């Protein structure tokens, strides 16, 4: 009973459509009708500005972190806490409070990893920022960081670097999150190939996308 309750709570936490609600209640604007139509952090930054974007980013990360810490808080020790975080990401991506149309899983996935290993998520954040600086695309940074997470979760535990020991459940969850992130960016990948992907006003744009 407790296990089912915590899974439901994790999913409902993830289902909070942060950007959508911030847009509706504070800006009287529906994010679905502007920009990419996505309700995640990137489109919130682009349409609503810095304050709304930072608030959305922080809350979406926190959703994953809280969900990952739920089993620890409630004394559930027979399952890896990252499993509960995964349900929060499912909620974020397919939110019951927003007709199952949510974000692209990046910020909440980062929150899940943060709850599991803060130093490891810092490493991934540095990779994200480096790729963002080189190519000026949040989408490419997200995809490459997801791939790097899969690679490093395979090798770091064997090297005793950041991740202390091999964890099959962590591997399965990270592969699942990476797959979800890449799938949710399929439209971005299409635009990258045609050199029309949206850029941030920072970095080198080495792939020479046309600035939007």
Image (cartoon, grey):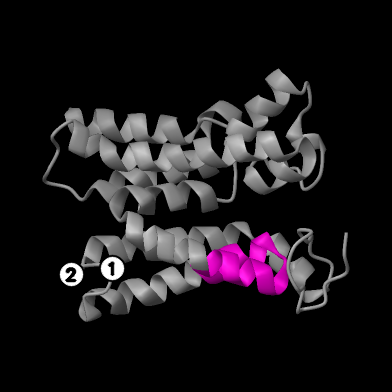
Residue identified by numbered label 2 = 165
Residue at image location 25% in from the left, 67% down from the top = 163
Within the image, what quadrant is residue 172 found in? bottom left
Residue at image location 12% in from the left, 43% down from the top = 77
User: 146 or 32: which is nearer to us?
Assistant: 146
Q: Which dot marks residue 87?
A: none
Answer above or below: position of 133 versus 180.
below
Q: Is residue 89 visible?
A: yes
Q: Residues within 10 Å of mark 1 (few under 14, many from 20)?
A: some
Left-right relation of 206 to 109: right
Instruction: Say if mark 2 contacts mark 1, CB within 8 Å.
Output: no
Q: Residue 64: x and y, percent? A: 41, 42
Q: Which dot marks residue 162?
A: 1
Q: Is residue 208 magenta?
A: no
Separation of residues labelled 2 and 1 (CA atoms): 9 Å
Q: Residue 91: x and y, percent? A: 47, 38
Q: Residue 169: x and y, percent? A: 25, 60
User: 131 or 79: which is nearer to us?
Assistant: 131
Where disc 2 sits, the SS reads loop
Answer above or below: position of 7 versus 207.
above
Q: Residues within 10 Å of mark 2 (few under 14, many from 20)?
A: some
Q: Residue 5: x and y, percent? A: 26, 28
Left-right relation of 49 to 6: right
Report the span colored magenta: 127-145
Within the image, what quadrant is residue 27 found in? top right
Left-right relation of 52 to 181: right
Give the main secondary structure of the magenta stretch. helix
Q: Is residue 134 magenta?
A: yes
Residue at image location 63% in from the left, 44% down from the top = 41
């Amino acid at each position: 009973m407790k296990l089912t309750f915590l899974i439901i709570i994790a999913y409902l936490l993830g289902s909070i459509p942060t950007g959508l609600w911030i847009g509706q209640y504070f800006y009287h604007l529906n994010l679905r009708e502007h920009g990419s139509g996505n309700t995640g952090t990137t489109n919130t930054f682009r349409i609503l500005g810095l304050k709304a974007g930072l608030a959305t980013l922080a809350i979406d990360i926190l959703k994953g972190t809280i969900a990952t810490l739920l089993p620890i808080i409630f004394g559930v020790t027979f399952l890896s806490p990252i499993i509960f975080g995964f349900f929060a990401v499912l909620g974020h991506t397919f939110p019951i409070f927003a007709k199952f149309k949510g974000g692209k899983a990046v910020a909440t996935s980062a929150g899940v990893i943060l709850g599991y290993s803060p130093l490891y998520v810092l490493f991934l954040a540095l990779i994200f920022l480096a790729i963002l600086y080189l190519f000026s695309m949040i989408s490419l940074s997200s995809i490459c960081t997801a791939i790097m997470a899969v690679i490093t979760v395979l090798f770091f535990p064997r090297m005793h670097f950041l991740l202390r020991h091999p964890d099959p459940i962590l591997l399965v969850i990270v592969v699942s999150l990476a797959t979800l992130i890449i799938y949710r960016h399929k439209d971005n990948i299409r635009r990258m190939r045609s050199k029309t992907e949206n850029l941030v006003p920072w970095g080198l744009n080495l792939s020479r996308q046309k600035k939007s």
